[in-house]
Amino acid sequence: MAELPNTDGPKKKSTGADLIIPVAAIAFTLYYFSTIWNSPWSAQVSAFFVGGVLMVLCAIYFVIFAMQRKNGEADFSLGKVINPVSVIPKRILLFVLTLAYIFVIDWFGFIITTFTFLSLGMLLLSEGKNKKLILSLSATLAIGGYLLFVVAFQRRFPDGPIEKWLKPFWYSTGIWQ
Amino acid sequence: MEVDFSVYGPAFLNTFQYWYVILPAVILGYVVGAIPGFSAANTIIVLLPATLAMGPEIGMIFMVALYASSRMGAGIPAILVNIPGTAGAAATPLDGYPMSQQGKGPQALAISFTSSCIGGLLTSIVVLFVIQYVVMAVYVLHSVEMIVVMLFGISLIGTIAAKEKLKGLIAGFFGLMIGAIGADHVYATPRGTFGFLELYDKIPLIPALVGLFAISEAFILIERGSIMTKEGQQVMRDAKWSEVFEGVRTTFKRIWHVLWTSIIGLVIGVVPGAGAAIAAFVAYQQSQTYSKTPELYGTGHIEGLIAPESANNGVTAGTLVPLLVIGIPGGATAAIMLVVLTYHGVTVGPDLFIDKPNFAYGAFAAMAVTYIIMIFTIFPLARYMSRVTMVPTMYIIPLIISFTLVGSFVPRAYLFDMYLAIAFGVIGYIARKTGYHVAAILIGVILGPLLEQYFVRALKISQGDIMVIFSSNLGNALWVGLLISLLIPIWKEWQKKRSAQKTALEKGEEAERGGTTE
């Protein structure tokens, strides 16, 4: 698969991808300023100082970028963030899977959701190979994580049907007080 | 405050009691250090639910032991297959890998482990004895000076740690701005919260660090199918005990070299942002400069391996100094330690050494004890432990994502915090891909609220006069230092560019003259 133009070459120093963080920083700073415009000075002083410095730094970066662009040393490509193109589908699918993991964990709880996420994630990255190993590894990690973090260290993880079903058991054994 | 040497004994004895925490952390540290991309920082994040449940003292001992041992583990892939486990081991392959190619892999590992242990142990003990004087010096810092110290810290992290200084500074100040999200201290006015009630109590640090480090790293790791080649594994299979003994003996013969290069690491480690990578390269360069055989460096020279390994372990004790004394983390792992300590309600700063001496000195004692325990693991480690580098990334990535996301849920039990971790993951991913330092962003997020606190305090004292930030002599000296530290790299870069242009021009003229003669 063809790769997008790589930005790390000797001539092209900066790219459009390098502008994402400064542009986001300026947008956020302006939004932040809008939320404190009518606030008392104690709520403004530090933000105006830090935000002011940040905007100056970003402005310097934009000037340098413009000069590099003029000399043919910079372009607006997003290759740095996207490359290598060959892993884009895996990256997008894993991102969607991650969002789904958070979305459903509140209903299905840690064990079921983690097992499903680990299995699907590993199957996706291994391109469907080693199914048995992946399923057993996912089950071990999900149950092991539950036993270590929830049962042993008594941390608050999202509860699902299995966790709710097991709760009385841990109390009855005296492991949980 | 008087220097009280009686605290050291109890601190050491107390730490030895926790050998059952240190030993598993050490083994875990070797494993994660040896797997590129799975650093100590990420492991502490994955194990956050456990670390948060441990209590501050045991949690700190666990993190320190993991940190120190992962530093040593990072040398394994660097020596065997030319892939440093962490950035701190970036100078290790220069002479370690050629040794491995010459069939001296086990010997090189033994040299690396021995110099790491001695270097780390020595610097932890040095810090333990010097830190009281550093603490006394910090007492002269008030709110005005602390503003400059914080800006100094973030600027140093930005300019030293990042490849491009301007990007490093933008990352640091962007982090400070994000850290200012939340209701203000006096009137509770919501600022920059995007309307989310969950952000009124400022940005929760654990989702921020989970996103910036773990989630972003996981999405970058996808690019690497597998970490290790077969050649490195073969070297370890053929290892003999005699080669390991030879490596240890060789290092002890050069003990003076181990000592002074580890002190270089310690001094650089105290500077926020400088980190193990810089320390290792500086030590390597110094070692070569003062060597009688500088031409052998890069060909599998023993001293070329000792220098970076001693130095990057010297950094570990140094990094804890600014963290515990003034609350400015010197690097990513220290920043994560600060998040965990904050969660436990531990206030870092000079008072920590008076109010909780066992805890404060105990952190350095724990490091020393960790290195003592690590000495006993050198022999088996040099033969067997390096096999962990064979773990494929397809199993690691989903594990990092799921366990760290759940870790971000733990402190407040808000699903919102998991989404927040994803948002920081996106920022972290873009930042890593485009050369903006994620540690600088995180440290900015941590220091943001503190900076505001000192600003408001200073302005209250001066009744709103902004010029108060230039009212103290020490503060002004720090401002000048800050300005110089920012200008020197720019001046050096400009000079370098100018000399490169001059050389190119001279070459062009010479070529032109040559052409005319012909």
Image (cartoon, coloured by chain):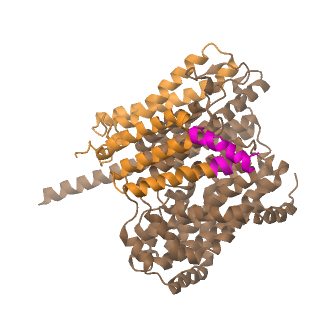
Which sits in the foreground, A11 or A35?
A: A35
Secondary structure mostly taken by the magenta-highlighted segment of the chain: helix
Residue B290 visible? The answer is no
- State whether residue B6 is above or below residue A59: below
Q: In the image, residue A62 lies at what x, y percent?
A: 40, 31
Chain letter matching colour brown: B
Residue at position x 30%, y 49% from top?
Answer: A10
Q: State the extent of the magenta-drawn residues as a range.
A: A148-177
Count of labels in the image? 0
Report the residue that reaches farthest toward the top.
A38
| Residue at image coords 46%, 66% | B77
Figure chain in orange: A
- Decide if residue A140 is on the left or right side of residue B120: left
Q: In the figure, residue B266 lies in which quadrant?
A: bottom right
Residue located at (74% from left, 32% from top): B471
Return the residue nearer the eye: A25 or B468: A25
- Residue sitting at 43 percent across and 48 percent down? A119
Question: Most extreme residue toward the bottom, as rendered?
Answer: B242
Q: Relative to A13, is B452 on the left or the right? A: right
Q: Residue furthest left?
A: B518
User: x%, y% of residue B308?
Assistant: 53, 66
The foreground one among B94 and B380 is B380
| In the image: residue B67, left or right of residue B231 | right
